[in-house]
Image (cartoon, coloured by chain):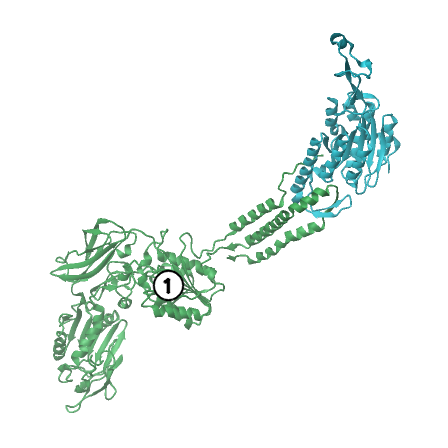
Chain colours: A cyan, B green
Amino acid sequence: MPPKESNIFKYIDQDAIVRFGGNPMLSQFPMEGSVSGHHKSNHKGSSVEFAEYREYTPGEDPKRMDWRVLARTDRYFLKEFEAETNLRSFHLLDCSASMKFGKPESKFEFSKKLIGTLSYAYLNQGDAVGLSLLLPNKTEEIPARRNPSQLQDILHTLAHTEASGKGQVIKQLHEVAESIKSRALVIIYSDFLDDPKSIADVIHHLRDRKHEVVLFHIMDRQEVDFIFDRPTRFIDLEGGASLLTEPSIIREEYLKQMRIHLNEIKKICTETQSSHYETITDVPVHEALKKFSFERTQN
Amino acid sequence: MSFLQPIALLGIALAAVPILIHLLNLMRHRRESWAAMRFLLKAKENSSRMSKIRRWLTLLSRALAICALALLMARPMATDESSLIAFADQKPEVVMLVLDRSSSMQKKFIGSSQTLLQRGLDEFEKLSKVWPETKLVAIETVFSETIVVDSAETILSKEMEDFFGPTDCGGNLPYTINQGLNWLENAGVGHAQILVISDNQKSNWEIQENEQMLNNINEIIDNKEGLWKLCFLKLEPAEMVNLSIVCKSYREENQQFHPTLLISGNQKETKSLAVKINVNGDLQTVKCRFAHPSTTWTPTISLSDQPPTGWISISLPEDSFVRDNQYFFTYGNQGMLKVAVRCKDEQTRKFINAACELDPENLYLDKNFSLESTKLNENDLLIHQGSFSQNEEGQVLEFIKSGGRIALFPEFEKESKSYAFQKWKTTESFSENNFFEISEWKRDQGIFANTANGRDLALPFLKILQRKVPSEGESLAFYKSGESFFRKKTIGTGVVYSFSTLPNKNWSNLGEGFVLVPLLIRIFEESSVKSASKLLECGDNFSLECNGFVSVTGNSNHNPSIREGIYKDLGKFFAFNRKSTETLPDILKLENLQKEMPSKHIVFTKASTTSLSFDRAEVWNLFLMAMLLFLIAESVFGLPSANIPSRSK
């Protein structure tokens, strides 16, 4: 049953918001915003941050000419300053059935909390926030906006979305990468159980489009530790085959495979200057976002 | 391997329980929805072989641990694989001990203070306890007669020492084994276990001489097709310092005794030995220079202050094996037959004395023996004519019973006479023209046997006018009328020879000598067997007949058939020494014996130096260890190998 309208704010973690404090979370790459903001822009602008001197070319606006340099050197130079703009953050949520896994809280529900909290934070600092739900057969999108009602839309959409079916996350991510026109912060919430090579392709695609890519790798504690005390039949949440096994016997190999997979994704992220955050659902949201916020508030 | 509580072996069936539990566990598994199937499938794929092995090893460890527990509770008893117990798969009717009781069995067992004989008997006791209900039979090499015993403890008891105790004899093991097998055959024994205990001294086997007998033993065992099983248990003697002494020859002259002695030793050394010489109890010590490997030594022993007959013992210093350190001799006229003549009839005495003096070197004659003055027991043979008083009759009977011999000639009185050793009929007479004629006698053997060139004795030429026929004993010659001319009667170990007429002209022409002299000589020969002057050996045929001999150098219960030493009988000394072949050190290899007896039902084994070969100790600790090991293995295989982090939250 979908939550009541008043309950949709549960997706905003109060502790996390308090801990972020007043410092804005800045992007790590220049952004293309529509209005002035806290983030670096790829254009020169009128901020107080000096950028460079450039020789004047006839036809350019003489407003930005440095008259003092002209007086001293009798040469024409333009004094340029960094432009600061807002960013558009796109939250991409994997809605495949595998995200339903997890106790007491599923990976999907935990991801919603992360999205809700970050959406609030970004909207609060004047940035635009958009949401893409990577559903099994379609992609539902809320375009990035910076008006206050956007939060409610996002939270409402999240509240009414359930994870189900066998996802085609990679294909949908490629589509999303194409659909986002200008530079943006793309945050993906998924368990990334796909082939690392295809994940690498998607990240490269997003980076080629000049987006800053952030991966929240959502995992459940049981997936990480894999502790079972008796024979178990594992049933694939995405409808694959079931497997009867003695977990204690294959545990070591399972953990090894998981480590290899994680390492490969981390390696891809390092190569593409993307951020990768291993997030386990049994930690509080503010803990899960601690590293993310720290890296972005210290710029 | 056998078990005291075999019922507990049913518990081995419980080994199936872990497997059943495992299968049940698989059946009642839990179901878990899972997202990361990707890793799970890969992990399963990669670890399936190892995991299968580990799983089965775990199950195997559990099953084996239960088996070990069941075996532990069944109280297993260990036996040596090569032992007779392992060899025997069925309870035998008879367990037979064939015991080598030769002198060499007195040597110390390797690594033990026990003698080989004691060790062998202990081994037999252990074996007998394997089948407590089975009949025990023993046969040993000295008497080679089968003895049925109640229990192995009987064999070990003091009372049975004469039959199973130490001896100074040799032995013939093939013969003894053969005798034992014959007994089993005659007793109709089905299943039998035969244990031959020996140090395998070559001289006790004489393989070449006994080849036929060994083949025979092999054939008998083979024919029984496993019903009779023969086990040869070889006992290894310890290699310790040992000196031995044997006599090669001796001579006696001018009141001096000169033995030629061979002293052998097993240590490479040259040393001076303090040899003790004991002459009739007078002990003196003489130095002898010994050089490895053997020294011939000829001491001169003075007999000047000694009685005309006596004994000598020569002893080496004590070492690891004392049985071969002594040698015994007798000196004086020990070898001469002592004959006492007591005849009331003068003619008879004259004839007999004349016949006796024909061989003065071998005969010591007391021509006028008197029962009142001289001890009868100091003689070998009494030739008597005349009547006996009641007292004399008693003396003579004792003399005969203790092994003495007496040749009786009839007395003059016509009435019938009855003594404890012979009964005489009334005297019969013929006229001068008629004689009692002898028609038949035992020509094939004994006193009346034909001469060496096959000629009959001249009995038909005897002209007998008077006769007084003895009525007791075996008739060796007969008158025409069927009456006995001569009888031979055995009483105890002694013999009574009875003539029916006298060498007296009024009685017969026996005094002419053509019959009387050969008869007397043959009586002397029969009597002189006991007084042979040669060096006697324990266990030989003569020693087995020497009952009543009194030991001079040993205990009163010593017997010349099994113990060396000086013995006295009828006033004469006898020196019995251990079997000379017992000094030979050669040991027969089991392989050589196996070649002669290749039957698969015969096993050859050496006695264990650490524990008894037939020891059946409980080996529960072995199975306890095994169980613990399997449980540890189960833990190793069954538990996850990686460190399991504690489940957080």
Query: Which residue is farthest bottom?
Result: B433
**Can you give x and y, in whole percent of width and height, for residue B148 in the image?**
40, 66
**Vertical relation: B150 (above or below) B388:** above
Residue B371 visible to the viewer = no
Report whether B584 appears left or right of A66: left
Foreground residue among A44 and B397: A44
Direction from residue B177 to residue B633 in the image, left or right:
right
Front position in the image: A27 or B97: A27
Compared to residue B294, the image places residue B379 above or below, namely below
Q: Residue at x 34, y 55 (%)?
A: B237
Residue at the spot 56% in from the left edge and 47% down from the top edge: B628
Q: Which residue is mark 1?
A: B593
Residue A287 in view in this figure:
yes
B550 or A205, which lies in front? A205
| Image location (x, y in percent) of residue A99 | 78, 38
Q: Amino acid at mark 1?
A: Leu
User: Which chain letter goes with mark 1?
Assistant: B
| The furthest residue to the front | A58
| Crowdedness near tag 1: few (<14), some (14–19) or many (≥20) residues, C-alpha within 10 Å | some
Task: Say which quarter of the image contains residue B373.
Answer: bottom left
Residue B287: x and y in percent read 18, 50
Closer to us: B226 or A147: A147
Left or right: B32, with B425 as reference point: right
Which quadrant of the rendered structure holds the C terminus of chain B? top right
Secondary structure, mark 1, is helix
